[in-house]
Every structure is written in C-alpha cells, then in structure tokens.
Image (cartoon, rainbow, N blue to C red):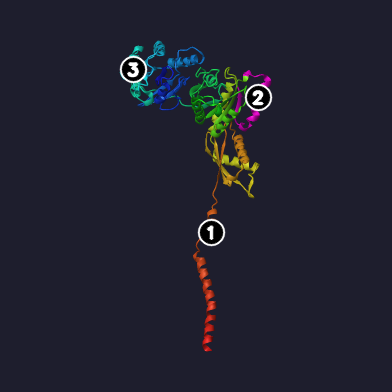
Amino acid sequence: MIPVIALIGRPNVGKSTMFNVLTRSRDAIVANEPGLTRDRQYGVGLREGKKFIIVDTGGLSGQKQDLDDLMAKQTLLALEEADEVIFMVDAQDGLISGDRFIAELVRKSGKPTRVVVNKVDGINPDQAEAEFYALGFDRVYLTSAAHRKGINPLLDQILSGFSDGVAGEVEPDGPTIAVIGRPNVGKSTLINRLAGEERVVAFDQPGTTRDTISVPFERHGKHYTLIDTAGVRKRGKVHEKVEKFSAIKALEAIEKAQVVVLVIDARDGLTDQDMSLLGFVLNSGRALVIAVNKWDGLEPEQRDYNKTTLQRRLSFVSFAAQHYISALHGTGVGEMMASIDQAHSSAFKEFNTRYLTDLLEEAVFKHNPPLRNGRRIKLRYAHQGGRNPPIIVIHGNQTEHLADAYHRYLMTFFITKLKLRGTPVQIQLKSGKNPFAEKSSHSSNKPKTKKYASKNKQDESRATSKNGPKHIQVKHIKKKR
C-alpha cells in the first residue's frame, strides 16, 4: 500500500506549506494566520519514483470548545489512519506547552513519529535541535518548508522504512463533483452524508469551510470524488484576504469538476448570489444538479410556494434536475445521486455526424432561420466538436447573423432530441467561404488575355486601314493641282 503520512502540530507551524511542498501543488491555502486549515486535506506526493499520501490537518490548540473540538476530531481521525506521523513544531516560538500536549497525544497513538522543527531560518540549528529533544523522541529534523530546505532527507528517511516504498496504484478517478453555494447552506453536511462519515467539519456557522477539500468515496461499486468548497458571498461583503482566496479556489473547483451541485437554502429561496453562481456554472459549461436543502424545516404551504417560485425562476436551466433534500437527515440524497450519474453520462455522450445533421434538418424544417437582407440563412450540416459539455458545430452561410432567439431554439431542440439530462449544449456556428467572392472582387483588376488583346489589335488595324487610303488620296489630289 501507499504509505500515509499525517502532518500534526499546533496552528500556524507551517503544515499547509509543507503539504504544498510535498505534493508540489497549491491545494492548501497558506497565510500568516492561524486556524486556516480545518478539515483533512489529502494529496499524493512522489519522491524518486516512490508514491506516498500526505494528509494536512487542522492545528491542535488543546481547547474543547465548538469549532476547535470538531477540528481536533478531524486531526485524530487522520492520526488513526496514518502509517507515519510528521509532528511539526515552530523554531521561532520554541518549545511550549501546546507542543508537549500534542507529543503525549502522538505517543499514545503508537505511530512512528518524526519531530520536524520548521522555520529554522536565522536560528542556531544546534540550539533548536537540542531544545526539542526534550519531547522525548529519537530524532529531530530541521526544515524550512517555505524555502524547501531539509525536506528531501526527511522524506528519504520516512520512505526507507516501508517495503520498497512503492505502493499499489491509486484508485481510478470517477466523476468529480463540486458542491457549491452560499455560506451555511449545508454543503459540508451534504458531503458528510454522501461520504458516509464525518469527513469535513460541519458547523452551524458561516465560513467554517475555507479551503477546497477533495473527498473520494465509493457508492454501489462506482468511484466518485467530491469537492467541498467555501461559501461564496457577494464581492462587496468580502473583506478578509483569506476569504477572497477561498472564493477563488471555489470558482476554480467548478472549472475542474465534471458535475456541479448547487446547494440552495430552502428557507431563503433563490437569492441574487445563487443566480451569480449559477451563471458562472453555465458559462463554464458544466453539468448541473440543483439541491434545495433544509426542505424538511418548511411548512407545507411554504413548500408549495417556494417550489413554484423556484421552478419559475429556474426555467432557463430546465435541463438541470431539482431535488428537495435534507442533508442532515438524508432525505432525497439517494435520488440526487441518480441525477448526478445521469448528468455525467449526458455530458460525455458521443454522436455521429449523420445523426446530428438529420436532427439539424428536422429543426430547420420545423422552424426556418429568419431572413437576412432578403436572403435565407442556410444551415447545411452539423457535427460534434467536444464533450463536457457536448459541443455541436453547425456549418452554413451567414451564420454570424443568426438571431440569439434562433440560437436558443437550436440549443433546446438538440437537448430534447438527444435526451440529455443535466448538461447544457453549446452551439458553435461556422460560415463557409464563398468560392466566387475572391474572383468577383478581383475581376476588374485582371490583365487582358491574349484573345481579347488580339481582337483589340485587329480593331485598331481596321480603323487605320479605313482612314489611311482617304488621307493618301487627298494628298495625291493636292499634288496634281
């Protein structure tokens, strides 16, 4: 198996920076602010052909209150599943009581542990090393994760303890599903419900999730990857730099995903921010499923009113399935997964050119394109130009003048006829070149051919011959006189 290495330590000792270095990525948000990481973040690292899984965890503060307690539970779960532990401490702060608390916790787990003294730049290495030997571990490693110092020797020592250090292949990736929405609409609760465990921190407080967390899970023998994202608020309400990074990573998750689940709070209905997120998903061309959460907390009359309002306002995304769920109790979640599978399947369908052209002819027969300057716009044939989303390329003449209304008509027609569910269709129009346009534009500038040149010479000679004798005859008469 691939060795699992967990990063454990107090807040702001450099665990997320170390995670990014080991995975050669920027998946974890890094800032000079404690408590950014709150969930378990998994990544795959590679060192001289040897794979390993690295787990970033939230900082252990030792407090047993609300959010800190939930973060500590996530860290303890990572500690249980780890094969090796990197216990990180801060050389700038020195040895403090919080480090001793974590040392006892790690020692009780019985897992092999490496004490890593981070941020050693500008500090006497012998002094830093000697101070942290007081924790009672056999070996202390000095590193600077921000400057990539001392990390390779640490990895070599860790991986040498495993049988050849080579793991089996990582599980094949299935559909990637990004769960997005405003803060505190139940995204993390939905992730935990689908994964079947307390995989991410779910707390009744807006802004609990700050990073994008990838959660692989298996359902009915099929592999999925869920991406929990931070709640995205209106731009005018975002003031913290960390929240701006969280929003950017949430939007990046939409681009990476194959299916997007937009979670809406049933109590608030469809807000302007929900519409903004929905517009971003449509522009990205991703398959879409809409989940209206906290449905169980509404009265029957309010349910009917909210359902009618949502269906009316979301009529422009009629291809997307709407599910009224309770992530906390699991109501309706199973049916939502069926729609996710259907949306993913529709987004990756393939169609042959003959079939698409026949459908185009049917669409034109039912509703002809409008006239342009008295001439009919002609659509000749269609073929598939891509997947996720399905792209249909239509060739014809004057297609650049096709009205938006007819463009929408074609998109709706193909979605209906191709039986696509959960995914939009992009229509690309291309106009063919007029083969006679270039000839007609240059006809006046063409040089005369030999045929026409010889004919002109003959005409000139005839004119000269007719006039010539008359002049000669006149001159001859003058001489006689």
Magenta span contains residue 311: yes
Cα–Cα gap, marks 2 and 1: 67 Å
Residue picked out by circle 1 = 443
Percent of width and height locating residue 64 = 49, 12
Identify the mark at residue 321; answer none if there is no mark.
Answer: none
Q: Magenta stretch?
A: 296-324
Residue picked out by circle 3 = 128
Q: For the point 51% across and 60% down, which residue is it?
A: 446
Mark 1 and mark 3 lie on one chain; the one further toward the N terminus is: 3
Label 2 neighbour load within 10 Å: few <14, some 14-19, many 20+: some
- Amino acid carrying label 3: it is Ala
Percent of width and height locating residue 253 = 50, 28
Residue picked out by circle 2 = 306
Dot 3 falls on a residue whose secondary structure is helix
Kindly tell me whether residue 379 is visible in this rendering.
no
Q: For the point 52% across and 89% down, which residue is it?
A: 480
Percent of width and height locating residue 48 = 35, 26
Circles 2 and 3, Cβ within 8 Å, touching? The answer is: no
Mark 2 and mark 1 lie on one chain; the one further toward the N terminus is: 2
From the viewer's perspective, is 383 left or right of 163? Answer: right
Q: What main secondary structure does the magenta stretch of the protein show?
A: helix
Q: Which residue lies furthest to the bottom in this view?
A: 481
Q: Which of these two is toward me, 16 or 321?
A: 16
